[in-house]
Image: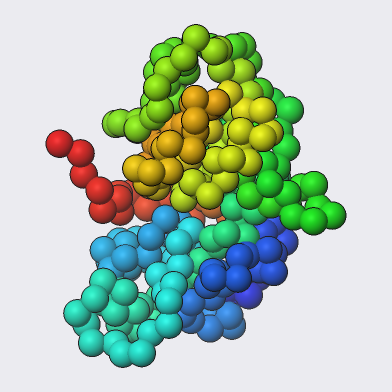
């Protein structure tokens, strides 16, 4: 019998909770660590629809990247998407566990390494490491298999990250060799990527005025928040299914990206 505690201990061995950012809410959001695991559904967002899928697939534990409760809840009234998810989880005894910025902040087996793997980057290192920790911090730096012209890099990036659109700065004649990556919201680290000598910076949630910070020194690529982190689902599935064989683990079928493209 495998308990939720067994799985959370394992995941926190990969990405300890103390590595999460101070604003984050990673960990067990709802449930009891003594519950026996019947099945696990891996996802990015633990929405009510994902909870329905979990119930249909006989899963009583959801492992999500984003915490469904991120800010403090003062009321639960079944009007907000967070309220609806939590009420459904409670009614159906489905536990919710989030592994968020702690998984972002590890070099090995983390969110950014998975992106780097899809782009076939080598010589990986943390983009903005924590003090006294070269393998812990924000983002990742790596080298492409071969230098690419900016337009060819964008084509490659779009294909490998399975994104419909890339918002980017002006193309130059500078070939792309060193690439910086921050899955999810990473505009804060644009100048860090430039200082690290990256030719391109792949991230998401870049605002209009933040694009100016590239200043012609780097190809800034916004591939979308969901798109940048979507392969975290299979990453979580691989971690869990390779370790635990006495219950079924699944990747969510439902795409929870709230953004559509016309």
Q: Quadrant of residue 161?
A: top left
Q: Quadrant of residue 168?
A: top left
Q: Give the number of marks.
A: 0
Where's residue 239, x and y in %?
A: 60, 51
Q: Quadrant of residue 164?
A: top left
> Which quadrant of the rendered structure holds the C terminus?
top left
Is residue 83 left or right of 220 when viewed as pictured?
A: left
Is residue 187 left or right of 76 when viewed as pictured?
A: right
Is residue 83 left or right of 203 when viewed as pictured?
A: left
Nearer to the camera, 259 or 62: 259
Q: Is residue 252 above or below residue 6?
A: above
Q: How is the image coloured?
A: rainbow
For residue 243, say whether it is visible: no
For residue 190, say whether it is visible: yes
Where's residue 14, x and y in %?
A: 69, 56
Q: Residue furthest bottom?
A: 75
Nearer to the camera, 35 or 210: 210
Name the residue located 51 percent from the left edge and 66 percent from the top edge: 98
> Which quadrant of the rendered structure holds the N terminus?
bottom right
Name the residue located 38 percent from the left edge and 60 percent from the top edge: 45
Q: Residue furthest left?
A: 262
Name the residue located 76 percent from the left edge and 47 percent from the top edge: 135
Where's residue 99, x and y in %?
A: 55, 62
Q: Is residue 43 above or below residue 199?
A: below
Where's residue 238, x and y in %?
A: 56, 46
Name the residue located 61 percent from the left edge and 33 percent from the top edge: 194
Nearer to the camera, 200 or 229: 200
């Amino acid at each position: 019998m495998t308990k939720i505690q067994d799985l959370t201990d394992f995941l926190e061995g990969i990405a300890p909770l103390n590595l999460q950012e101070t604003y984050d809410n990673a960990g067990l959001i709802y449930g009891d660590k003594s519950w026996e695991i019947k099945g696990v559904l891996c996802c990015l967002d633990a929405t009510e629809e994902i909870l329905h899928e979990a119930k249909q697939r006989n899963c009583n534990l959801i492992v999500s990247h984003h915490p469904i409760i991120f800010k403090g809840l003062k009321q639960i009234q079944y009007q907000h998407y967070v309220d609806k998810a939590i009420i459904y989880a409670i009614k159906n005894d489905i536990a919710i566990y989030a592994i968020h910025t702690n998984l972002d902040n590890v070099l090995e087996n983390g969110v950014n390494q998975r992106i780097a793997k899809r782009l076939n980057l080598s010589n990986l290192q943390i983009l903005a490491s924590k003090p006294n920790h070269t393998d812990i911090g924000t983002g990742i730096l790596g080298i492409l298999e071969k230098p690419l012209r900016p337009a060819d890099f964008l084509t490659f990036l779009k294909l490998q990250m399975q994104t419909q659109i890339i918002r980017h700065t002006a193309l130059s004649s500078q070939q792309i060799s060193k690439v910086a990556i921050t899955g999810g919201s990473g505009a804060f680290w644009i100048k860090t990527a430039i200082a690290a000598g990256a030719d391109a910076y792949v991230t998401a949630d870049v605002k209009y005025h933040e694009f100016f910070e590239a200043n012609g020194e780097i190809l800034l690529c916004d591939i979308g928040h969901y798109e940048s982190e979507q392969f975290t689902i299979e990453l979580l599935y691989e971690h869990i299914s390779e370790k635990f064989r006495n219950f079924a683990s699944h990747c969510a079928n439902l795409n929870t990206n709230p953004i559509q493209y016309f």
